[in-house]
Image: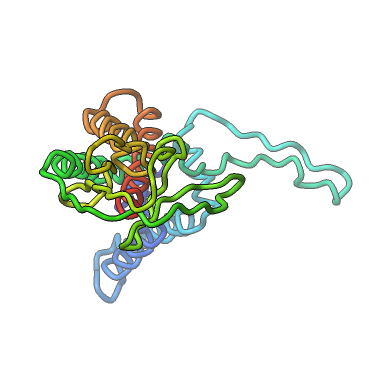
Amino acid sequence: MQDYYLVLGVPRTAQPAEIKRAYRKLVQQLHPDVNPDQHAQELIKLVNEAYDVLGDERKRSEYDYRLENPFTQTVEPPLHRDPRYRGRGAYRPPQPKGPTERDLMILALPYFRPVAVAGCLLFALLVADYFLPPNQSVETLVKFRNEAFRRGWQDYLVTNTGRAVKIAVDDVQTLPVKSQLVFTESAIFNILVRVQTLDKTIVITNLGSLYGNFIFVPVLMAGGCVLWILGLGSLEFKFSLGIINVFLVIFTVILIFVS
């Protein structure tokens, strides 16, 4: 069986545009006005025959099947007497399949690496932010504010600077208005770490900030990113972990800005 890919000088995975370029190049080289060789006419016929097959999607699909299965004979059923039924049972070679889920996972893996690296660097920056000497400011409690929040209510303490901090009622049952409060914030991102009175009789750390109730988020992010970089687990595990890391990195960045 003639190998048309070899005739045109292209690989079997060649795209239609690549096949067309190879065909045009050979036609120009074998044209009688350019190539006086007596075998040029025979060769150009073979090139035309190869392009007629490989340049047509249906013919190429049938040809590829015969090329990969040289010992398989395809038998077409006899035509039905009624012309309306003719051709319905004709053999159709298998059509080329698209990429599988595993192929898509392999293609996606390189995009998860910069996310994992960014997650590790972000965690290192957060560690430095947390352990550097914090910023502290003293403000006066002006009032408590109660606002509707989804299906319940959210309590805030409001200071003379207009700062409003989400709190739990149990944390401030004995905290009077006009109390002097010390706000401790991280050095780099100014994330609220704790609120306390001057005499430290009341210390509030149950805060809805990255270094409060959501401190587990950067820890999970760092663990997932390190596991991904180490390359542990199967392809499916790395793909799922990569997606989780993307959401954890985004969630961590959001918490940095809203804390």
Residue at screen point 45% across, 38% down: 67
> 47 or 43, which is in the foreground?
47
Provide residue 98's location: percent of width, then percent of height. Answer: 49, 44
Residue at screen point 34% across, 53% down: 178
Does residue 18 appear to the left or right of 134 in the view shown?
A: right
Residue 255 shows in this picture: yes
Provide residue 61's location: percent of width, then percent of height. Answer: 52, 46
The quarter in which the N terminus is drawn is top left
Does residue 256 appear to the left or right of 154 in the view shown?
A: left
> 14 or 107, which is in the foreground?
107
Residue 209 lies in quadrant: top left
Does residue 208 appear to the left or right of 38 in the view shown?
A: right
Residue 175 lies in quadrant: top left
Q: Residue furthest left?
A: 133
Provide residue 34's location: percent of width, then percent of height. Answer: 24, 74
Q: Is residue 233 above or below residue 210?
A: above
Residue 164 lies in quadrant: bottom left
Q: Is residue 170 above or below residue 84?
A: above
Provide residue 203's location: percent of width, then percent of height. Answer: 29, 36
Q: Residue furthest top?
A: 233
> 202 or 131, which is in the foreground?
202
Does residue 148 appear to the left or right of 165 in the view shown?
A: right
